[in-house]
Image (cartoon, helix red, strand yellow):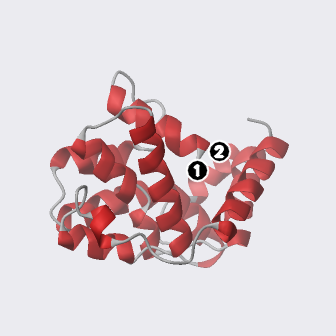
């Protein structure tokens, strides 16, 4: 995807988030997919992230997916971002940095999430953080693996992971 396409994509994603309902997704809707402790974890995400996760869930279900681990991973795939939340400016910085300086952006994503590297660290490390948080909340090993790998497009052969990645990339 070109830099301009990524910027347009992120702008549209932000606009959708602004238009998304401010009311949280009800526990009644979440309970078939998440345990009570996982719902508590889900609730710690910013409402933009919750709306995005719910859209990923809805898209997977509309595509006919019913696997409970996949659907739980859809709701929790970005939960690692609660450890170092990203602002809109952070997101733009990451998109531009990854496009213009891909090797440097990967390097900036290593280490502690502080200073100017914080957005890059969050972008790179939130899948692993999220998998650890989900595990601590009682998620299955399969859910945790889907969360951990949701941005690893080199991982191949896993149809559930490919479905999550495809919908996440479009949402």
Residue 25 image position (x, y, % from top left): 42, 69
Closest to the observer: 114 or 80?
80
Closest to the observer: 71 or 141?
71
Secondary structure under tag 1 reads helix
Please tell me which residue is depicted at 28% across the width and 68% down the height of the picture.
28
Please tell me which residue is depicted at 52% across the width and 45% down the height of the picture.
168
Q: Are marks 2 and 1 in contact (CB under 8 Å)?
A: yes
| Image-quadrant location for residue 60 | top left
Task: Say which residue label 2 marks.
Answer: 103
Picture layout, residue 107 above or below residue 84: above
Farthest residue, direction front: 28
Farthest residue, direction top: 157
- How busy is the neighbourhood of tag 2: few (under 14 within 10 Å), some, or many (20 plus)? few
Closest to the observer: 136 or 100?
136
Secondary structure under tag 2 reads helix
> Position of 46 compared to 144: left or right?
right
Residue 31 image position (x, y, % from top left): 23, 63
Please tell me which residue is depicted at 24% across the width and 67% down the height of the picture.
38
Instruction: Say the numbered circle drawn on residue 106.
Output: 1
Residue at mark 2 to residue at mark 1: CA–CA distance: 5 Å
Placement of the N terminus among the 4 image quadrants: top right
- How busy is the neighbourhood of tag 1: few (under 14 within 10 Å), some, or many (20 plus)? some
Instruction: Say the numbered circle drawn on residue 74.
Output: none
> Position of 85 compared to 105: left or right?
left
| Image-quadrant location for residue 99 | top right
């Amino acid at each position: 995807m070109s830099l301009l396409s990524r910027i347009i994509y992120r702008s549209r994603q932000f606009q959708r988030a602004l238009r998304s309902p401010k009311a949280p997704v009800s526990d009644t809707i979440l309970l078939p997919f998440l345990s009570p402790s996982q719902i508590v974890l889900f609730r710690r995400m910013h409402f933009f992230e919750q709306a995005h996760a719910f859209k990923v869930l809805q898209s997977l279900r509309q595509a006919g997916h019913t696997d409970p681990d996949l659907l739980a991973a859809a709701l929790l795939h970005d939960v690692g971002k609660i450890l170092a939340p990203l602002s809109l400016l952070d997101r733009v910085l990451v998109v531009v940095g990854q496009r213009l300086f891909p090797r440097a952006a990967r390097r900036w994503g290593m280490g502690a999430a502080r200073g100017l590297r914080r957005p890059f660290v969050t972008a790179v490390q939130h899948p692993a953080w999220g998998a650890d948080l989900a595990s601590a909340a009682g998620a299955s090993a399969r859910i945790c693996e889907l969360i951990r790998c949701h941005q690893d497009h080199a991982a191949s052969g896993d149809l559930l992971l490919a479905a999550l990645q495809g919908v996440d990339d479009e949402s």
